[in-house]
Image (cartoon, grey):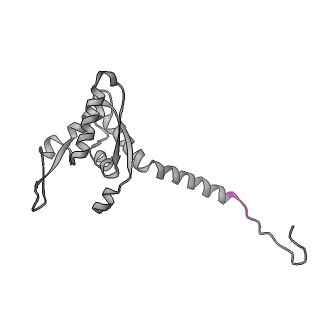
Amino acid sequence: MSNKELADEEEFIIGISRNEARYLDDSFTLLVQSDAEDNSITYMRPIQMTAGLAVPIELMEKVGKAVLYTTEPDNLGKDYKFPVSISELYMIREVASSFVRVGDEPVGFSLKRKVCDLLYGDLLKKESSDRIAFKLLKEVEIIPNKVSKDKPLE
């Protein structure tokens, strides 16, 4: 995907819980350009040991706001909703391991489910409606309409 395509990406709205926000915040590290001249990239902390993925500052800010919002006493139990691009959804998907739990909450699976719903939900609905339409059309018997040349159409 080119930079222009990324800039023109469609945005989606995702809502994440307090534990999901905490998990994402712990799983991400900041992606930093270390030298503008040679375009080399580095990370704020080691990826393998403490963070799952290096992400741009824009996603770090969104997750940081989610942590603050969901830990405010007035917002306990509420999800924080924010816009994400397709590339940000794929970044979240990369760290959303299905087996990860925070307390009793399956945060990895719930994040993966939310992301997949946003990425593929409409496609799955379309596939399902296409299958139904195909089945209905298959069951319809088309009888050719024979028109007599002598008899006018009504």
In the picture shown, does residue 118 fall above or below 142?
Answer: above
Q: Residue at (60%, 53%) from the top-left corner?
A: 132
Image location of residue 16, percent across then percent down: 34, 35
Q: Residue 133: horizontal and vertical position, in percent?
A: 61, 55
Q: Residue at x 22, y 48 (%)?
A: 56
Q: Name the residue furthest right.
A: 150
Tell me, yes or no, whether the highlighted magenta stretch contains residue 126. no
Choose top left, top right, bottom left or bottom right for residue 14.
top left
Q: Is residue 144 left or right of residue 49?
A: right
Read off the magenta span.
Answer: 139-143
* Quarter of the image where the C terminus is located: bottom right
Prevailing secondary structure class for the magenta stretch in the rendered image: loop
The residue nearer to you, when weighing 149 against 5, is: 5
Q: Quadrant of the N terminus?
A: bottom left
In-image side of 18 versus 141 (left or right): left
Q: Position of residue 76 (x, y in %)?
A: 33, 24
Q: Nearer the viewer, residue 141 or 34?
A: 34
Q: In which quadrant of the rendered view does residue 92 lie?
A: top left
Compared with 153, 98 (above or below) is above
Above/below status of 108 relative to 78: below
